[in-house]
Image: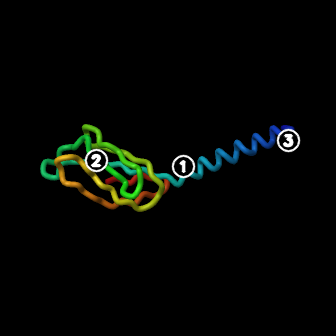
Amino acid sequence: MLALDRKSAAVLWATALSLTLAASVHAQQGTIAGRVTDEASGQPLGDVRVQVTGTSISAVSTPQGTYTSHVSAGTYQLRAVRIGLATTTRSVTVRAGETATT
């Protein structure tokens, strides 16, 4: 049997609690991933800012048009913005521990 003094037991308990809380928060997170393309040609569009409306979360699409954002589980409005192109809005629902694709 492992014997711990009070201070060591308190530190061990605090560490275990912190790990449990971190795992709980992570489990409530989800991911939004997608690809931005030109509506007419289907070609990928880079440098498009994909904003999660009502939050400070956003991502910029790569030259291949892909983007990824990590958010809490919930339903969001995504807004795709790039100078010279029409702004597009789309709804997405993210479940904890899953990736929602757009």
Give the quarter of the image for residue 1. top right
Q: Position of residue 47 (x, y in %)?
A: 26, 41
Q: Position of residue 29 (x, y in %)?
A: 49, 52
Does residue 89 appear to the left or right of 85 in the view shown?
right
**Label 1 residue SS:** helix
Residue at x 72%, y 44% (from the top left corner): 14
Q: Which mark is residue 26?
A: 1
Q: Position of residue 67 (x, y in %)?
A: 33, 44
| Neighbours of disc 3 within 10 Å: few (<14), some (14-19), many (20+) | few
Query: Could you tell which of marks 3 and 2 lies nearer the N-terminus?
Result: 3
| Neighbours of disc 2 within 10 Å: few (<14), some (14-19), many (20+) | some
Query: Could you tell which of marks 3 and 1 lies nearer the N-terminus?
Result: 3
Which residue type does callout 2 highlight? Arg
Residue that numbered label 3 is attached to: 6
> How many angstroms separate mark 3 from mark 2 (CA)?
54 Å
Q: Position of residue 5 (x, y in %)?
A: 86, 38
Which residue type does callout 3 highlight? Arg
Residue that numbered label 2 is attached to: 35
Does residue 89 appear to the left or right of 14 in the view shown?
left
Viewer-nearest of discs 3 and 1: 3
> How many angstroms separate mark 3 from mark 1 (CA)?
30 Å
User: Farthest residue in the left direction?
Assistant: 40
Residue at x 75%, y 45% (from the top left corner): 13
Residue at x 81%, y 38% (from the top left corner): 8
Which residue type does callout 1 highlight? His
| Neighbours of disc 1 within 10 Å: few (<14), some (14-19), many (20+) | few
In the image, 4 versus 81, the foreground residue is: 81
**Label 2 residue SS:** strand
